[in-house]
Image (tube, rainbow, N blue to C red):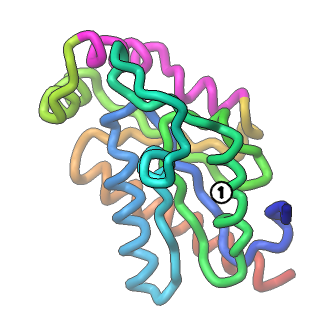
Amino acid sequence: MQQTSKRLRKFPNILVTGTPGCGKTTLCENIVSAMAQQNIKYNHLNVSQIAVDGKFTEEYDMERQTHVLDEEPLLDHLEEILSDFEETGYVVDYHSSELFPERWFDAVVCLATDNTVLYNRLSKRGYAEQKIQENLQCEIFQVCLQEAQESYDKDLVLHLVNDTDDDMEDNVESISKLINTGINSRRNL
C-alpha cells in the first residue's frame, strides 16, 4: 500500500478534533467552502460517517450510543483516500486524534467549547444525559487536546475556541491562512 508523505503533498492536510458537539463538522464544511472561493480544492472527510457508510464498524455500543470502529480496514481505506494528495487537500474530522498516523497531517486543530454551549448543543442532538455528562467531562479535562499533544508534534497542534459564530469565522480565517501559507511554502520546494 502506498503511504502518504508529508514532503510530497501539494496541499496541507488538516485534522480537526475535539469533543463531540464542539463544531468540527461545521468548521470543516466552512473551510472547504472558503477554499473553494479561492479556487483551491479541499475535501472534508468525516471519519465517523465514513466508518458507518463504509461498514468499517464492529458493533454498536448501546450503552454509549455509538459505533465501535473496525480500525484497521478503516485506516487502510483512509490511507487510499489521503494518498491522492496531488489534486486536493483534506480536512479530516474526528473526535480522537490518536487513531491516525502523524505523517497524514500538517496541522491538528483541537476545538474547545464552553461547557454550557456544549451542553446545549448535545441536548439539541438528543444525546442521553449520561452521554452528555461524559462528553462534558472530556471537555473539562481537555482530553482531546492532551491526546493531540501526545500524538503529534506540539508545534502542529492549534487549540481554538469555538463557542460562537464569530469564533467560527475567526477559526475558518486562521485555518485558511495556515493552508495558504502551506501551499505557498510548497511552491518554493
The reply to whether residue 159 is in sight is yes
Quadrant of the image occupied by residue 134:
top left
Q: In the image, residue 112 lies at what x, y percent?
A: 40, 33
Q: Which residue position holds label 1?
A: 77
The residue nearer to you, when weighing 140 against 28, is: 28
Answer with the quarter of the image where residue 157 lies.
top right
Q: Provide the secondary structure element on which disc 1 rests.
A: helix
Q: Residue at x 71, y 41 (%)?
A: 72
In the image: residue 99, left or right of residue 48: right
Q: Which residues are magenta?
A: 130-150
Q: Is residue 21 left or right of residue 57?
A: left
Where in the figure is residue 31, as x and y percent of width and height? Answer: 42, 66
Vertical arrangement, residue 78 with respect to residue 136, above or below: below
Left or right of residue 144: residue 171:
left
Q: Determine crowd level at label 1: few under 14, some 14-19, many 20+ residues with C-alpha closer than 10 A.
A: some
Q: Is 59 in front, or is 89?
A: 59
**Circle 1: residue type:** His
In the rendered image, residue 133 lying in the magenta stretch gets the answer: yes
The quadrant of the picture occupied by the N terminus is bottom right
Residue lying furthest bottom: 39
For residue 106, say whether it is visible.
no
**Residue 152 among those drawn in magenta:** no
Which percent across, then down, holds residue 109? 54, 46
Task: Please give the name of the residue rendered at 60% of the width and 72% of the height, measured from the top-left corner.
Answer: 89
Q: Is residue 166 above or below residue 131?
A: below
Q: Quarter of the image containing the C terminus?
A: bottom right
Please name the predominant secondary structure of the magenta segment in the image.
helix
